[in-house]
Amino acid sequence: MDKRIYLAEKPTSYWIASTPETGYPSLDQDLHADVAIVGGGIAGITTAYLLTLEGLRVAVIEADRILRGTTGHTTAKLTSQHALIYDKLIGRFGKDLALQYANANESAIRWVWKIAKEQNIDCDLSEQDAYVYTQKEENRDGIDREIEAALELGIKAEFAERIPFDIPVAGAVRFKNQAQFHPLKFLLPLAKEIENRGGRIFENSRAVELEEKEKPSVAVQNGAKVTADRVVVASHYPFINKEGLYFARIYVDRSYALGIRAKEKYPGGMYINAEDPSRSMRSQPDGDGELILVVGEKHKTGQGVDTMLHYENLMDFADEIFTVEDIPYRWSTQDCMTLDGVPYVGRYAKDNPDVYVATGYGKWGMTNAIASAHLIRDLIVKGESPYGEIYDPSRMATGAAIGNFVVQNANVVGQLLGGKLAPLPDDVELEKGEARVVEIDGHRAGAYRDRDGAVHVVDTTCTHLGCELNWNSAEKTWDCPCHGSRFTYEGEVVEGPANNPLNSVKNTNIVERVATDQF
């Protein structure tokens, strides 16, 4: 039986579905602020909130609706346990810098508890233990080294022989006093408080250019701009190409999530395995009882097999552990990965002291983004941060990072050339809901037939740096295998770094040929 019939046709995030829509205006005229913040996710909203508490006038510029990007598609674990990271950090950076990372993320957890209590925010916040488990005996040493490293950095960690599921394990590391929450229920009240304190939030206002004169200014697609003393780029993937070479130092990974209902009650705790393919679990209370979030299946954006297979693999995993009764939610997301596994947070470039960046959370964005907001607040207000060195975007690359730089950029070149040279199929018959890459007048184009039978044809050359896009069957988007930009089948930008939409093929004769399978 085809497992796909159990999945909703359209992906829907539980976090977004369970909270009201926002309705902030678009930026339609020039204005001035003390700080302009590009990006209305957890990093941007938290940074704006912290800066308004300091009395600064802020303006948040969001391309879509706030909190509907990566923040609205997270697993929402509030944990300093970022897989098996601390043994690696000590080896790469030394104990002092590893301690900065540990303290930054532990502090982020405590800050959420503090604000939720002070502001009386009901966001399903609960304390949970976090586990990384291995099913391979040969990886047991990695678990032991991680426990030793965590204890050395002051984190409450211990060995666990087993986890409360019918999964054979060789051992696990448990971090105590971690947490989980509903991120939008927590952040939406902070957005209201930003406005209450004089800040401005603008939605459907895609930033397309940073102008640097006496003061930096951010221009949006309609030509309006915000001029500010400081600019914070918290747009997930930095939208500025010319400085910092972030496009060469970041790659983008996708992962998938199911929100299931099961016959069994979830035993508590947050879990992730140490091997590939990745598997992560946690629970979430909702009005109908309890959801169990089953997450994993990472791959580089725009690369790999039929994306619907990743949902099927998660369904198989869920069926092995639970008696699945319903799958009301499914969604996917992507995050920026850095070369050494630590986010880039701080001044965008050494010669540009008025522009700041926060990116590269490596799928651990809940605590890292909050830590980033505090770091940037400190740099703007105090000129320094206790976490500044480990997150510094200009930090020297280690040996492992240099090797990763070569691997990732070779992959980009391979995708760029391979996409241009890949042969095109002769058969382009399209069923409803299907897409193909076709050749039109010597050029590659993407054709999609929607559920009503209408055909949409777009140029498949990414408007960021020119890579050829691939079809994402699970989300019905055209995705870039080089830098992670994503577009709707009509060509509109879903995720950057691309700022401009795809060119749509308007020639009615060409569209008619595709629609009638005359290629």
Image (spheres, rainbow, N blue to C red):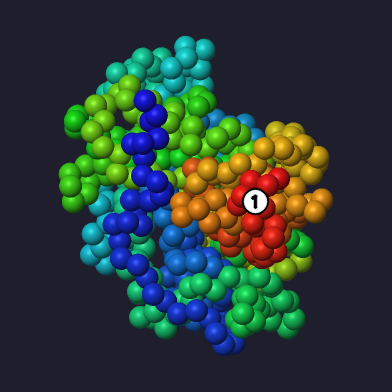
Q: Where is mark 1, residue-wise?
A: 514
Relative image position of residue 210 (x, y in whole percent): 69, 73
Residue at left offset 35%, top offset 74%: 192
**Residue 118 against residue 196 in the figure, above or below:** above
Q: Position of residue 323 (x, y in %)?
A: 24, 26
Residue at the outermost top position: 137
- What residue is drawn where x is 29% and y is 57%? 18
Rendered view: 24 above or below 327? below
Q: Quadrant of the N terminus?
A: top left
| Nearer to me, 90 or 476 | 476
Question: Height in image: 186 above or below 484?
Answer: below
Say few, some or many: other residues with alpha carbon within 10 Å of mark 1 (under 14 / 14 to 19 / 20 or more): many
Quadrant of res 220: bottom right
Looking at the image, residue 465 sits to the left or right of residue 335; the answer is right
Identified at 58% across, 32% down, the residue is 305
**Which quadrant of the view contains residue 34?**
bottom right
Q: Position of residue 137 (x, y in %)?
A: 47, 12
SS of the residue under disc 1: helix
**Please, what is the three-letter code of the amino acid marked with disc 1?**
Val
Please state which of residues 290 and 96 is positioned toward the viewer in this rendering.
Answer: 290
